[in-house]
Amino acid sequence: MDRCIVLVDAGYLLGAAATLLRGDAARSRLSVDHAGLIQQIRDRAQTETGQSLLRIYWFDGAPDRVPQPEHRRLRVMPRVTVRLGMLTRVDGRVQQKGVDAAMHAQLTELARHKAASDIVLITGDGDLLPGVMAAKEHGVAMHLWAVQAADGAYNQSEDLVAEADERQLLDRAWLTQAITATKPAPLDIPARAAPEPSALSATSQASFPVPARAPTPTPGDLARSASAVALRWSSDAGWVDPDDGIPLLDSLTTPRQMWVDREQDLSVGGEPHEVGKIFAARWVERLPHDQAADLLDRLDQTHPRIPRSLDSELLRYAARFGAIANDALDISDDHRVRLRAGFWSGIEQSAGALSAPTS
C-alpha cells in the first residue's frame, strides 16, 4: 500500500527535546504547540517518504492510563491516534511502562497487514529492533528519525540506527518551530502590608527597623526571601487529609461543574502561574456565600503558606497538565513556586471581585 505511517514515542521526542533545549529531560519545562508539531511531522513524513500519510500514532504514558489534557487535544486531531501506557515510579523517578511494547505490537501488526509502504519511527528505544527487522521482512521501508542530541551525546540505540533503511535528524531549528523552553515570568505574589510604625514600641523600632519595601522584587530577591521558601515548601507531597478546616475545591464542585472544568482545561496551556490562578478562581467562586468572608480571612492569615490540604489538591490538579508534570511529586521546585504564586494572585484577584459592590 503506497502510503506512510508515523509512530511517535512522545517520551523520547519531548524528553530529548527538553535535554537539547534546557539541559535536562523534564518535559514540564517545555511549551509544546501540539497542533503545530503534528502538522510538521505530517508534512515532513510525506515529503521524505514521497507517500501520503495514513495516520500518526502518538505513544505516551499517563497515570493509570487516564488521558491528560494534551492527550485529549491530540486524539481529536485528524489522522492522529493516541495510545497510552502507564506511568510508574521506580527509585524515585517516573518511568513509562508498556509504551515500547505497544509500539512494537503496533509496528508488527501494521507491517504484517501491509498497511503502509513506509513507516517512520521517532524513538530511540532498542527494544523496537525486532519489530523493525520483522517490518522489513514484510517489505516495509523503515525510516528512523532522531532528535538532535545535546553536547554530542547519543540518544538512540546503535543497533536500531544500523537496522533502519533511512535516517533523518530533527534538529534544533525544526524542533523549535513548535517546541520552546519555558522562561520564568516575574512572580506575582500579592504583597501584605507591613505593620504600622505606631503598632511597634520605640524599643522595637530601634532594634528592628521596618525596611522600605521594594515595589517589585526581582526573582533573585524572591528566591532568597521567606515568601519564596514558603511557596517552595508549602506542604508535604502527596495526599494529606483536610485537617485544617479549609474546604477543598473537590468538595465545592458539582459533577456538572467538574465536567465543565475539564472541558475548559483543554484550552489551558499549562503555564504554572496560570494554572494556579485558575484553581484559586474556581475555589473562591464556589465558596458558600455565608462562609466566604471568614474562609478568605483564615486563608489570608496563612500567607504565603497555603494550608496543606488545599496545597496538596493544587499540586494534584497541576499534575494533570503535561506541561507541568506527569505526577505531582515530579513538579519542579521552580514550578511549585510559580504555581503557588499564581494561586495567591488568583485569590487576591477573585476575592477583590467578590467584595466589589454591585450596582
Image (cartoon, rainbow, N blue to C red):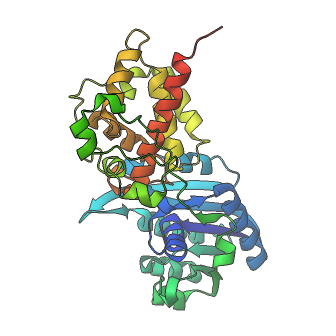
Location of residue 93 in the rendering, given as x and y in whole percent from the top left corner: 30, 64
Kindly identify the residue that appears in the image at 27 percent across and 32 percent down: 200
Q: Position of residue 68 (x, y in %)?
A: 49, 47
Q: Is residue 201 above or below residue 358?
A: below
Which quarter shows the C terminus? top right
Which residue: 48% across, 83% down? 156
Instruction: Tell me which corner region of the image, top left, top right, bottom left or bottom right, holds residue 21.
Output: bottom right
Q: Please indicate, yes or no, whether residue 290 appears anywhere in the rendered image.
A: yes
Q: In the rendered picture of this protein, how many numbered marks are placed on residues?
A: 0
- Horizontal side, residue 219 vs residue 269: left or right: left
Residue 246: quadrant of the picture: top left
Residue name at image x 29 percent, y 34 percent: 307
Query: Compared to 262, does 208 lie above or below?
Result: below
Tell me the quarter of the image containing the N terminus.
bottom right
Q: Toward the viewer: 253 or 125?
A: 253
- Of 4 and 234, the residue lying toward us: 234
Q: Tell me the quarter of the picture where residue 313 sits.
A: top left
Residue 264 percent coordinates (x, y): 59, 34
Q: Position of residue 266 (x, y in %)?
A: 59, 41
Q: Nearer the viewer, residue 21 or 337?
A: 337
